[in-house]
Amino acid sequence: MLIISDKVRINEKIKGKEFRIISSTGEQLGIMSISEALEAARKEELDLVEISPAAVPPVCKIMDYGKYKYEQTRKAKDAKKKQKVVVVKEVKLRTRIDDHDLETKVNAIKKFLEKDNKVKVTLVQFGREKSYQDMGIELLDQVAGQLEDVAEVEKRYKESQKYLMLSAKK
C-alpha cells in the first residue's frame, strides 16, 4: 500500500496569519485570515488544505481532503506502473570454453537482450588462466563481435575486472 505523506496541513493544523484562498470550483477568493478561510470551508462542508506553504502568502484550497488523498494515491500507483525496471542478467565465461558451449551462452545472451534486459558478460579465470589475460580479452571481444547486430557494448573490461555490459540495440 502506498502512503501519502502527512506533511499536508489541513483545517486547524494550518499555521499563519494570511493565506491566498482558492475555492472548490477553482476561482480565487483572495487573501484571507485563517479564521475566515476555515469559515468559508465549513460553509461548503469541505476541508481547507494547504497546497503551497512556501508561496508568499501561502496558498490554501477548499476541497474534500479524502478525495485529494485518494487522487494522490492513484497518481503514485500509475507512476509506479509506468516505471521501467532494468534487470541485469549475468553470464559467466571461462577462458577455456568450447565453441559449442560459447554458442549456447551467446544464444542465452540474445534471449535476455530480446526481453530488454541488460547483460553482464563476466570472464572468470582460475589459477594459471590468470596469467593469460590476453586470451580472456580475445574471448570477450569475440562475444561482442558475435552480438554486434543485436547488442551494443555499454562498458568494456577494465584492468582488474574483465567483463562486458551489453544492452539491446534500439
Image: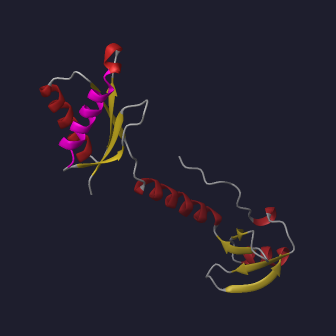
In the displayed image of the protein, which residue is found farthest to the right?
A: 17
Residue at screen point 61% across, 54% down: 4
Q: Where 82 falls versus 117 (above or below)?
A: below
Residue at screen point 79% across, 73% down: 38
Q: Is residue 119 magenta?
A: no
In the displayed image of the protein, which residue is found farthest to the left?
A: 100
Q: Where 74 falls versus 35 (above or below)?
A: above
Residue at screen point 79% across, 77% down: 57
- Is residue 167 found left or right of 23 in the rendered image? left
Residue sitting nearer the eye, 115 or 113:
113
The dominant secondary structure in magenta is helix
The percent position of residue 96, horizontal first and vertical second, equals 22, 21
The percent position of residue 163, horizontal first and vertical second, equals 35, 34
Magenta-tinted stretch = 132-148
Dividing the picture into quadrants, the one containing residue 126 is top left
- Is residue 120 found left or right of 57 in the rendered image? left
Q: How many marks?
A: 0
Dividing the picture into quadrants, the one containing residue 143 is top left
Task: State the quadrant of the C terminus.
Answer: bottom left
Residue sitting nearer the eye, 23 or 125:
125
Q: Where 66 falls versus 19 (above or below)?
A: above
- Is residue 93 found left or right of 84 in the rendered image? left
Q: Is residue 136 magenta?
A: yes
In the displayed image of the protein, which residue is found farthest to the top?
A: 127
- Is residue 134 found left or right of 72 in the rendered image? left
Residue sitting nearer the eye, 144 or 137:
137
Residue sitting nearer the eye, 149 or 59:
149
The percent position of residue 16, horizontal first and vertical second, equals 85, 70
Q: State how the image is colored.
A: secondary structure
Residue at screen point 54% across, 57% down: 73
